[in-house]
Amino acid sequence: MDYGFGNINFKFMEFRHLRYFLALAEELHFGRAAQRLSISQPPLSLNIQQLEASVGAQLFTRNSRGVQLTAAGQAFVPAARALLAQAGAAMREAREVAQGQAGELQIGFAGTLLYCGLPQVLQRFQDSHPRLRLVMRELSSSEQLSELVRDRLDVGFVHTPRVPPGFEQILVASQAMVACLPAGHALTKAPSIGLQALQGQALVVVSRTVSPDYHERILSECELAGWVPPVVHELRHWLSVVALVAQGQGVALVPEALAQSALAGAVFVPLKDSTLRYDTRCLWRSGRDQTALQDFVKSVNADMASGQPTPPELSQKR
């Protein structure tokens, strides 16, 4: 006989039925089971009848000698225990998610955040939320905005002032831009340089499609200094920009935190009289009823926005 219980009518089954069934299966006595459950015998009998109707099989035999499990009842015991255990685990998971202690956060970031204190912030937050899964996705600012709008990210760290409607933001970092030069460049020993000193040299920048804001701002800064780069190399990542400069293929203006990248062959020199800044904003959708997200934003605001990490001395790369 098949006791796989594939035809159980779950529509009419309640967890109460399973608890009552297991109590009776263990006590094999209606009086003792009812006492254990703190109910009277008639409601216990009624619930067992309802459960048997839902299962579609008799689970107990009742006679003058007492109560016995049928073969179907014996087979149903482990299934009932498993169902209650699964329900208990689901309820605990739901409570922990509601409390911000479990679940998942999808976090977008650009690569430069690895040098601005983000790994340390994530580690501290993970230590205080060990059951919460933090899923990191390295994306450009444009890609993050697209994913945030589609609710495929919970929070993003973007380098753009273009914030879509319906989103909140906090400024978590604001860095100076510095000149990135190949190690053999004549200006690597200068304490600082003006942009006009780079006139006539090939410029390496992040791609317009990846970071349109900073692409345009860097080229505009050069024009304000009185020159237009003869050659412009466009790359997708800031670290690629630094790597290409290190190979002697041009100069660049990059966020000062990249001085921590430790790429051999690249030297970072402060810019003279430049107001060009590289701002990082933490972005999330307004009105999200998600405790973990709210806790994460508070942590970011406390750890990053209130005390931004100080980059090492630029001279150490010379």
Image (cartoon, helix red, strand yellow):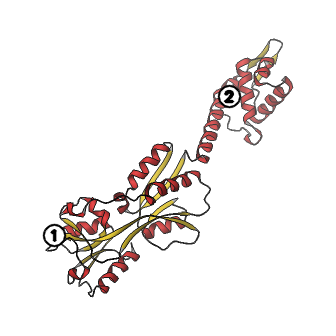
- Amino acid carrying label 1: it is Lys
Q: Nearer the viewer, mark 2 or mark 1?
A: 1
Q: Position of residue 145 (x, y in %)?
A: 49, 68
> Which residue is under mark 2?
76
Q: Residue at x 84, y 23 (%)?
A: 41
The x, y position of residue 148, in whole percent, is 52, 65
Front-lying residue, 193 or 132: 193
Report the residue that reaches farthest toward the bottom: 226
Instruction: Report the residue marked by disc 1.
Output: 189
Q: Is residue 272 left or right of residue 22?
A: left
**x then y, percent, for residue 289:** 62, 56
Counting from the top left corner in percent of width and height, residue 303 is at 44, 54
Place residue 318 in its image quadrant. bottom left
Q: Amino acid at mark 2?
A: Phe
Tell me the residue at 13%/74% (across/down): 186
- Between residue 106 and residue 294, name the one nearer to us: 294
Placement of 196 over or under 78, stated as above or below: below
Q: Residues within 10 Å of mark 1 (few under 14, many from 20)?
A: some
**Mark 2, residues whose alpha carbon is within 10 Å: few (<14), some, or many (≥20)?**
many
